[in-house]
Image: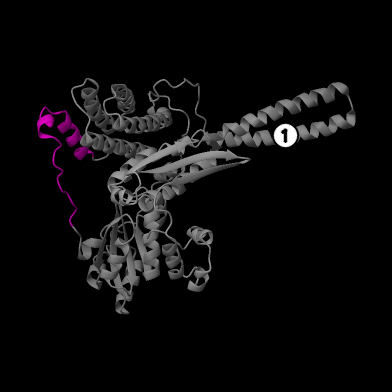
Amino acid sequence: MDMNAYLSMFIDESNDHLQSLNENLLKLESAPDDISIVQIIFRSAHTLKGMSATMGFEDLAALTHEMENVLDLVRNNKLKMDDFIFDTLFKGLDALDAMVQDVVGGGTGKADVSAIVTNLKAIVSPDYKTQGAPKAEAASAPEKSGGEAGADIELDQFQISVLKQSIETGHQVFHIQVTVQETCMLKAVRAYMVFELLEQSGEVVKSEPSVQDIEQEKFDRSFSVYLITQHTSEDLKSRIENISEIESAQVTVMDEESIGMLSKPSRPETAKPAAQKDASEAKPTAGAPAAGGGGGAAAVTKTIRVDIDRLDVLMNLFSELLIDRVRLEQLASEIKRGDLTETVEHMARVSGDLQNIVLKLRMVPVESVFNRFPRMVRDLAKTLEKKIDLIISGAETELDRTVIDEIGDPLVHLLRNSLDHGIESVEKRVEAGKPETGTVNLRAFHSGNNVFIEIEDDGAGINRERVLSIAVKNGVITAEQGAGMTDEEVYMLLLRSRIQYGR
C-alpha cells in the first residue's frame, strides 16, 4: 500500500487535530474541572495517534500515546489538572507540531522528545500525587571556543582567505552564535534585527543556516555567523543581547590558526537536496473546517479540500469563458435573432452566478489565522508574568486566501507589541487603578469593499517622547521637526521602516 498517496490528507488532518487540541486545552485551562472538554481532547489525541501509527510515524504516535495516558486518568477522575500538567501537555503539542512540519518538509517526523516523555510518565506515576512535579534538570550545551567555535559553518577557500587577510590588516574576526528565547514567536524578525546590527558593525562573511533559510524560519533557536569588524567582542555581545527576545550571544575571537583549522581539503561542498527544495516549495493547504472531533455541538458541514493551484486554473478558465460570452453578446446583437439573444442573456445570468461562486471559493475566514493567537498570548503572558485576556471578534470575516497567507506574521508582531509594551505589569496596573488583567481586542470587520483588522489594548498607550527620541536617533526626523509634530504625526512614525519601537 502506497502511503505517499495519503500523505497530503494526513498532514491536513493532523494540522486540524493539533489546532483542535490547542483550542480545547486552552478552554480546559479556564475550566479545569470540565470533563466534557477532556473527552474532546482525548478523542482528538486518540485519532492523531492512530493516523500517525498507520502512516508509520512512530515518534508521533508514541508521544501522542503518552499524552493520551495522562488525559485518560483525567477523564476518569483519577488525576486533577494542574499548572505542570498543562505546561507539559502544551510542550507536547509544540513537539507534535514540529514533527508534522518536519513531515511537511519531507522528513520522517522524528524528534528528541525524551524530556517531555519523562515528564508525562512522571505525571501518570502513583508518586505524582504525593511528590508533585519532577524537578527540571538544568542542561546546557558547553560553550565552544577557538577552532571548535566555527565548526558548524562550511567555509570555502575564498572565504577563509578573506578572513585571514582581514586579520592581517588589523580587523577583528568573530564567530558569533546567537540564540533566541524558546518562547519567541517571530524568530525571523529577531534574526533580521541581529543581521541589521551586524551589517552596521562590519561585514558578515557567512551564516549558518543561510540567510534565506533564516528569513523563512528554517532554524531551531540558534544561528551562527562570521563577522569582520573593528568593534570589540564585549560591545557586540552587549548590543546583540539588548535586542528583545535574544537569549544569548556567544562571541568568539578567531585568529589565523583557528581559521586555518577550518580549511579541510577533503570537505565536500554541501548542496541542498533536491527533495528538500521540492518540499520547501510545496505548501500544505489549510483553512478548511476540521474533520476531526473538536467542536462539541457545532453544526456538521460537508466540505472537501481543494488545492489552491486548481482554483487558480479554474479562475483562468472562467476568464476565458467571460471573453467568449462578450463576443457572443456582440454577435447576437448583430444577427438579431430572438432565440439566440434569449440564449445569450441566459448564459450571461448563469455565468454571473458562476463568477460569484468562483470568487467565493478563494475566500477563507480570518479565523484560520486568529486561531493561533490565544495560545501565543497564553504562553507569552506566563513568560512576562502578566494577566492578559484576548478577546477575538469577527473571526468569520472572509479574506482571499493569498491575503490570509501573508497577514499572519504582521499580526503576530502587532500583538507582541501590545503584550510586551502596551499591557503593564500587574503591579503597575494596580497602582494606576486598573484591573489586574489587561485586555487585548483583536477584531475583523467589513466596511464597504474593505476588510479592517484592528488590535486594541487597554495598556499604557504609546510613549510619545520615546518614539520621538528613537526617530531623532535614527535620523528619520530632526529634534526641531519633532517639537512641532502633533500626537497623530508622532504615532505615524511607528510605521517608518527605521523605527523599531520598544527596543
Horizontal placement of 194 versus 147: left or right? right
Horizontal placement of 209 versus 356: left or right? left
- View extreme (bottom): residue: 169
Q: Position of residue 174 (x, y in %)?
A: 28, 68
Q: Which residue is mark 1?
A: 322
> To which quarter of the image does residue 339 belong?
top right
Residue at 40% from the left image edge and 29% from the top image edge: 13
Q: Hey, what amino acid is under mark 1?
A: Leu
How many numbered marks appear? 1
Other-residue count near label 1 (Cα within 10 Å), few / some / many at <14 / 14–19 / ≥20: some
SS at circle 1: helix
Residue at 37% from the left image edge and 56% from the top image edge: 191
Task: Tell me which segment is drawn in magenta.
Answer: 113-142
Q: Position of residue 14 (x, y in %)?
A: 37, 31
Q: Nearer the viewer, residue 354 or 312?
A: 354
Which coloring applies here?
A: one colour
Q: Is residue 289 magenta?
A: no
Residue at 16% from the left image edge and 28% from the top image edge: 124
Q: Is residue 123 magenta?
A: yes
Q: Position of residue 276 (x, y in %)?
A: 39, 44
Residue at 83% from the left image edge and 34% from the top image edge: 330
> To which quarter of the image does residue 97 belong?
top left
Query: Is residue 210 in view from this perspective?
Result: no
Horizontal placement of 449 versus 231: left or right? right
The quadrant of the rendering that contains the C terminus is bottom left
> To which quarter of the image does residue 242 belong?
bottom left
The quadrant of the rendering that contains the N terminus is top left
Horizontal placement of 287 versus 60: left or right? right
Q: Nearer the viewer, residue 338 or 78?
A: 78
Q: Position of residue 120 (x, y in %)?
A: 19, 33
